[in-house]
Amino acid sequence: MNALLLWFHRTGSPPNFDRFCARWVPWCFAAAVILLLPGLYGALFAVPTDYKQGDSFRILYIHVPAAWSAMFIFVAMAVQAFIALVWRIKACETLAVAAAPVGAAFAAITLITGSIWGRPTWGTWWEWDPRLTSMLVMFFLYIGVIALHNAIEDRRAAARAACFLALIGVINVPIVHFSVDWWNSLHQGDTINLTRGESQMHTSMLWPLILTTLATKFWFVGSLLQRARVLNLENESAQPWAKALAMEAR
């Protein structure tokens, strides 16, 4: 068997998966904090004031990384859901379900910061703009995955149902991303185009955005592994290794 596939299958076993999560969670959170602190300092104090929007533009350093993370997490959730449904790997089911609350949090942050930013920029807290509306749909899809998983008593059946919804809902991700190009949108176009490597931001304003974006990714991975570990222990609570771990924690 290929070494990578062998590692994947070994790590996917519940006890090994628990150890993997426990090992990497603190490192991910530490990396997130190390990147976030200078990123926020740069966003609040080092970056010059925007000549059009003044200091209100600084919320971009929270809004944009949160929006990118919300979309990234939905894709990651759908990939895990696909693997779980095709190859019946428990760890992937757990990761898909664990990703939903984290993604929902980032989608909520995106909507809240967007409304706060929109008030001085557009003169309104909310507008049924294609980008805003599609992001709101993404938030409700995250909530739907969470609700569906909690509504079914059988844990494996609940995880599979949630995975199906995640696969269906991923169709909304390109709609969110390309909405400003496909429709006449009040929302501004992409300031940074990752596919073409283009940026309309000056480098003096760009570096804090890079740091906060990386910080949100590490925070997501740490939160994902922490939640996945809890779900894994709940699902395997009857197993001897899980009982032994619970006894050690006491």
Image (cartoon, helix red, strand yellow):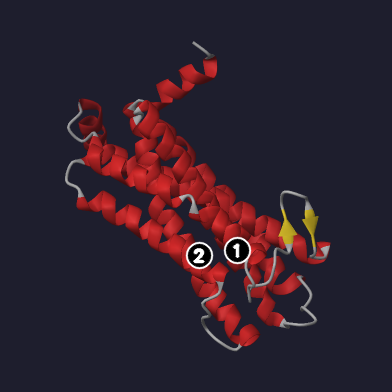
**139 horizontally vs 240: left or right:** right
Label number found at residue 179 = 1
**232 horizontally vs 76: left or right:** left
* Residue most extreme to the front: 183
Q: Quadrant of residue 102?
A: bottom left
Separation of residues labelled 2 and 1 (CA atoms):
8 Å
Badge 2 marks a residue whose secondary structure is: helix
Amino acid bearing label 1: Ser
* Residue most extreme to the top: 1
Badge 1, how many Cα within 10 Å: few under 14, some, many 20+?
A: many
Does 167 appear above or below 241?
A: below
- Number of marks: 2
Does 34 appear above or below 81?
A: below
Can residue 193 be seen by looking at this rendering? yes
What percent of the width, then of the height, locates residue 114? 56, 74
**Which residue was labeled with disc 2?**
134
**239 horizontally vs 202: left or right:** left
What percent of the width, then of the height, locates residue 239? 20, 28
Location of the C terminus by quadrant is top left
**142 horizontally vs 59: left or right:** left
Residue at image location 35% in from the left, 59% down from the top: 143
Q: Do the residues labelled 2 and 1 touch (CB within 8 Å)?
A: yes
Earlier residue among tags 2 and 1: 2
Q: In which quarter of the image is residue 88?
A: top left
Residue at image location 82% in from the left, 65% down from the top: 202
